[in-house]
Image (cartoon, helix red, strand yellow):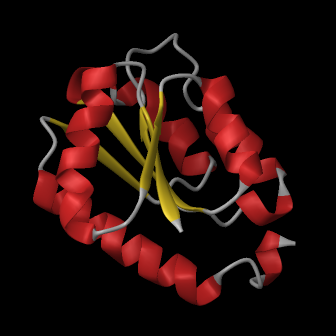
Amino acid sequence: MKILLIDECAWGIKALEAALVPLDVPTAGVSSNDAALKTLIRGGVGLVVLVLGRPGADRLEVVRYMRRIGPMRCIPVITVSDRRYLAGFVVEAAELEVADVLTTPLDPQALRFKARYLLTVHGRCGTDHPSCS
């Protein structure tokens, strides 16, 4: 299983990749919703880390799509947002059952801890969980 990293900034993807290196889990970084959806459809994604950016850029579109499609429904999502913009996302993120919301500046250890935990739990449940069908 790989971790899908979604950020409109290439340097943001590189920073997330660097933070996750100690987990020794493959990552796939994309900068658009379309590329994220294509990666999800191809399969093999065990976790999504989504940088939300500013309100108005509809980054939660990816999560809304995931929650409608059987096997993708159970893939955990960690969102990353600037504290200044958090209020604009937190209610919908909760409604979409986002696993966690982290704020910037991002603590790499916190990201690794949460990613490891969510990958482990998702690996145990897999897509055999009733809510994934």
> From what the image shows, is residue 72 above or below residue 11?
below
Q: Which residue is found at the position 79% from the left and 71% from the top?
A: 132
Q: Which residue is found at the position 52% from the left and 53% from the top?
A: 98
Q: Which residue is found at the position 61% from the left and 35% from the top?
A: 36
70 left or right of 76 in image: right
**Relative image position of residue 103 (x, y in whole percent):** 23, 39
**Relative image position of residue 71 (x, y in whole percent):** 78, 65
In the orientation shown, which residue stands out farthest toward the top?
A: 56
**Relative image position of residue 121 (x, y in whole percent):** 49, 82
Q: In what quadrant of the picture does the N terminus appear?
A: bottom right
Q: Can the viewer see residue 113 in this picture?
A: no
121 left or right of 18 in image: right
Q: Can the viewer see residue 54 in this picture?
A: yes
> From what the image shows, is residue 36 above or below residue 115?
above
Q: Nearer the viewer, residue 113 or 44?
A: 44
Q: Which residue is found at the position 12% from the left and 35% from the top?
A: 105
**Relative image position of residue 89 (x, y in whole percent):** 46, 31
The answer to which image quadrant residue 130 occupies is: bottom right
The answer to which image quadrant residue 34 occupies is: top right
